[in-house]
Image: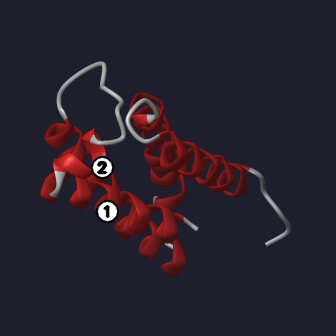
Amino acid sequence: MVLAVGLFETVVGLTALMNEQFLSAMGGSLLVWDLSAWGWIHLVFGLAALVVGASLWSGAVWSRSMAVLLVTLNMVAQFVFVSVYPLWAVALLVADLLVLYALTVRANE
């Protein structure tokens, strides 16, 4: 699931960087910075989530705590981005909540 969130974040970041008019046509405005800066933020979060997701899959010890930190920061970024693209931001917030729940609740491994 972290890999899926990373892929979605990468798509949002690339969309914001390559075609600002697509996101600005949604009618929202951001509290801080512009769409290209948030494009870079989403791209960095997406690529980091892809790396952390791959390390989670391989069983790296550090990856669980890093994934919790990354998903929490991504949720903050989605709250800021909700005014620009509400449906996408809420969908990613739900996905982030599911990932956070899966990472923090221990099942019998």
Residue underneath mark 2:
42
The residue furthest bottom is 58
- Residue 90 is left or right of residue 49, and the answer is right
Relative to residue 18, is residue 88 depicted above or below? above
Secondary structure under tag 1 reads helix
Gap in angstroms between the C-alphas marked 1 and 2:
6 Å
- Residue 57 is left or right of residue 38, and the answer is right
- Residue 58 is left or right of residue 25, and the answer is right
Residue 18 in the image, given as x and y percentages of width and height: 14, 59
Residue 34 in the image, given as x and y percentages of width and height: 17, 31
- Residue 76 is left or right of residue 34, and the answer is right
**Amino acid type, label 1:** Thr
Of the 4 image quadrants, the one containing the C terminus is: bottom right
Residue depicted at 43% across the width and 75% down the height:
54
Q: How many marks?
A: 2
Q: Is residue 61 visible?
A: no
Q: Residues within 10 Å of mark 2 (few under 14, many from 20)?
A: many
Viewer-proximal residue among 44 and 84: 84
Residue 6 in the image, given as x and y percentages of width and height: 41, 63
**Amino acid type, label 2:** His
Secondary structure under tag 2 reads helix
Relative to residue 16, is residue 54 depicted above or below? below
- Marks 1 and 2, the one that precedes in the sequence: 1
**Disc ID at residue 63:** none
Residue underneath mark 1:
10
Residue depicted at 36% across the width and 30% down the height:
28
Q: Is residue 90 visible?
A: yes
Q: Residues within 10 Å of mark 1 (few under 14, many from 20)?
A: many
Q: Are marks 1 and 2 in contact (CB under 8 Å)?
A: yes
Residue 24 in the image, given as x and y percentages of width and height: 26, 40
Residue depicted at 43% across the width and 47% down the height:
70
Residue 31, quarter of the rendered image: top left
